[in-house]
Amino acid sequence: MPQTKILVDSCSYFRLAQNIHPLLSVAFGAADYTLYAHAELKAEFSRTPRLQTKFEWFMEADYIENRARPLRIGRKEKGAIETTFDFMWPEVRNRGPSRVDTWILATAYDGDR
């Protein structure tokens, strides 16, 4: 049975990863649900001192290893995701999700088309 892939946003990852470990790339349930983090998660962590202070465990070897298998996206899908992101970002930039979370939304929107 093929996986049912679920893309985890940064907030969900930071809130769940320490309590449910390993969180990512482990199938569960009848539909083989599998959680993935977006490749931009590490970049968001690296440029946000508040996250670095609050979630210092993020850089521990076990968590790095668990994030080593990000969601794979083909070239065609990447183009569609970029187009969707370019449409979404001007609308949410000043009032909503982070840039990374907007990429995640764009990926989720275009990923299964």
Image (spheres, helix red, strand yellow):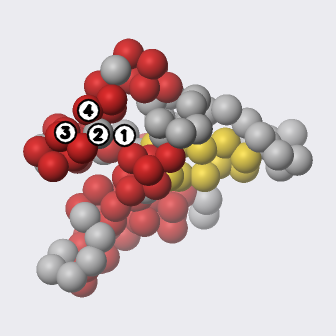
Please report the residue visible at 36 percent of the width from the left and 40 percent of the height from the top. 39
Mark 4–mark 2 CB contact (< 8 Å): yes
Determine which of the numbered discs, if any, sits on residue 55 in the image.
Answer: 2
Amino acid at pointer 1:
Ala
Judge the density around disc 2: few (<14), some (14-19), many (≥20) Cα neighbours within 10 Å.
some
Determine which of the numbered discs, if any, sits on residue 111 in the image.
Answer: none
Q: Which residue is mark 4?
A: 56
Please report the residue visible at 60 percent of the width from the left and 44 percent of the height from the top. 35
Going from N to C along the chain, the mark reached first, 1 or 4, is 1
Going from N to C along the chain, the mark reached first, 3 or 1, is 1
Q: Which residue is mark 3?
A: 52
Mark 2–mark 1 CB contact (< 8 Å): no
Name the quadrant of the C terminus: bottom right
Secondary-structure class at tag 2: loop
Mark 3–mark 2 CB contact (< 8 Å): yes
Q: Which residue is mark 1?
A: 39
Residue 50 rendering spot, x and y as whole percentages = 15, 49
Mark 3–mark 4 CB contact (< 8 Å): yes
Amino acid at pointer 4:
Glu
Secondary-structure class at tag 1: loop
Going from N to C along the chain, the mark reached first, 2 or 1, is 1
Residue 78 rendering spot, x and y as whole percentages = 40, 51
Mark 3–mark 1 CB contact (< 8 Å): no
Name the quadrant of the N terminus: top right
Amino acid at pointer 3:
Gln
